[in-house]
Image (cartoon, helix red, strand yellow):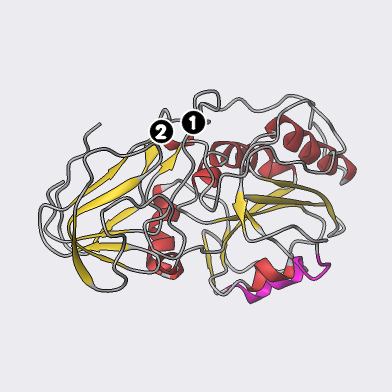
């Protein structure tokens, strides 16, 4: 890797299928009202879920900013079926739901459905409104986005996860929730039911067909053996450079002769910070031994940078 100046974000590598805040495994969630036999997939978050607060929808008025829409309020949304979902733009689990959210927003927008994405950041750099605005456009998030950088809406919904979906009926009641990936047919059937209850005509029972591309493609769960990891010292695992990490100061690291599975290491002059690592001089290297179909790296340049990725 040849870089003039590089800042690696909070996530080192995310093997497709692994959630950003930990490899969760098989999650047991309450049985939904429309069982389809689809497996519960993976998500990440900040703790166990609680009951949804009735003040959740009203909290939209306290958003830091709105993208793709003028500000929306509970009173303005009265009579609409609403899908509120929590996301943050580096979350691979949310990214793999986006093709469905986009399709539902388009298919049912004239039937009374309003899809609202609440962008609540996991990392400090995701609080930057310019970053959120840029990534909203780049990721083709075309529906209204409430920017929730201080977790006001998150707390009002008593939410704990990315991605999380709250299905709200025309009377403003949360009727269904889903946390994580998967269960797309089930979720769309919930939307259809709530729209029909609201009096919408011509809903039918047909479901969307999507063709996800790139990082929106579902994980290869059968071959996945590597979880997510972080490069910052606060939450990293498996750091294998000899001598360990030197916190918050420039240090020269080496990659050991052999890495064990799911271990990683640095080579060159780096500063290991709480939630990121920064390369201080050219010709730094980061190495990771993984077992997965795909790997994702959250990375941003502090200046113009060049890098090579070798497998």
Query: Disc 2 on helix, strand or loop?
Result: helix
Quadrant of the image occupied by residue 309: top left
Quadrant of the image occupied by residue 159: bottom right
Residue bearing mark 2:
214
**Is the Cβ of the residue at disc 1 closer than 8 Å to that at disc 2?**
yes
Q: Residue furthest front?
A: 243
- Percent from the top left, x then y, of residue 281? 11, 62
State the mark number for residue 128.
none
Left or right relative to 9: residue 38: right
Picture layout, residue 31 above or below residue 77? above
Over which residues does the magenta segment extend? Answer: 53-63
Q: Would residue 172 be counted in the magenta stretch? A: no
Tell me the CA gap for discs 1 and 2. Answer: 6 Å
* Residue sitting at x 55%, y 23%: 222
Q: Nearer the viewer, residue 166 or 209?
A: 166
The one of 164 and 231 positioned closer to us in this rendering:
231
- Asked if residue 184 lies left or right of residue 22, the reply is right
Task: Indicate whether 121 appears above or below 41.
Answer: below
Residue picked out by circle 1: 217
Q: Position of residue 76 (x, y in %)?
A: 74, 66
Q: Residue at x 64, y 76 (%)?
A: 62
Q: Nearer the viewer, residue 28 or 204?
A: 28
Q: Residues within 10 Å of mark 2 (few under 14, many from 20)?
A: few
Instruction: Decide whether residue 55 is among the magenta residues.
Output: yes
Q: Which residue lies at the image location 61% right of the left edge and 56% below the top edge?
A: 45
């Amino acid at each position: 890797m040849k870089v003039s100046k590089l800042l690696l974000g909070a996530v080192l590598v995310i093997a497709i299928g692994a959630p950003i805040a930990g490899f969760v495994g098989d999650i047991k969630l309450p049985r939904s009202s429309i069982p389809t036999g689809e497996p519960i997939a993976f998500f990440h978050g900040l703790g166990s879920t609680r009951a949804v607060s009735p003040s959740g929808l009203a909290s939209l008025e306290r958003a830091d900013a709105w993208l793709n829409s003028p500000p929306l309020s509970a009173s303005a949304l009265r009579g609409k079926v609403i899908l509120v979902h929590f996301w943050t733009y580096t979350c691979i689990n949310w990214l793999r739901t986006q093709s469905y959210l986009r399709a539902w927003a388009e298919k049912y927008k004239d039937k009374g459905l309003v899809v609202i994405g609440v962008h609540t950041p996991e990392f400090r750099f995701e609080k930057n409104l310019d970053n959120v605005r840029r990534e909203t456009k780049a990721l083709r998030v075309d529906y209204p986005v409430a920017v929730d950088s201080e977790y006001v809406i998150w707390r009002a919904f008593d939410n704990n996860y990315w991605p999380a979906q709250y299905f709200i009926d025309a009377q403003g009641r949360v009727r269904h929730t889903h946390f994580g990936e998967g269960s797309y047919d089930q979720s769309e059937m919930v939307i259809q039911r709530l729209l029909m209850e609201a009096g919408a005509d011509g809903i039918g029972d047909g479901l969307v067909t999507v063709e996800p591309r790139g990082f929106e493609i579902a994980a290869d769960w059968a071959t996945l053996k590597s979880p997510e990891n972080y490069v910052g010292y606060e939450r990293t695992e498996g750091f294998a450079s000899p001598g360990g990490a030197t916190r918050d100061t420039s240090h020269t690291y080496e990659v050991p002769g052999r890495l064990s599975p799911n271990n990683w290491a640095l080579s060159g002059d780096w500063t290991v910070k709480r939630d990121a690592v920064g390369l201080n001089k050219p010709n730094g290297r980061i190495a990771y031994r993984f077992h997965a179909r795909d790997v994702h790296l959250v990375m941003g340049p502090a200046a113009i940078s060049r890098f090579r990725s070798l497998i």
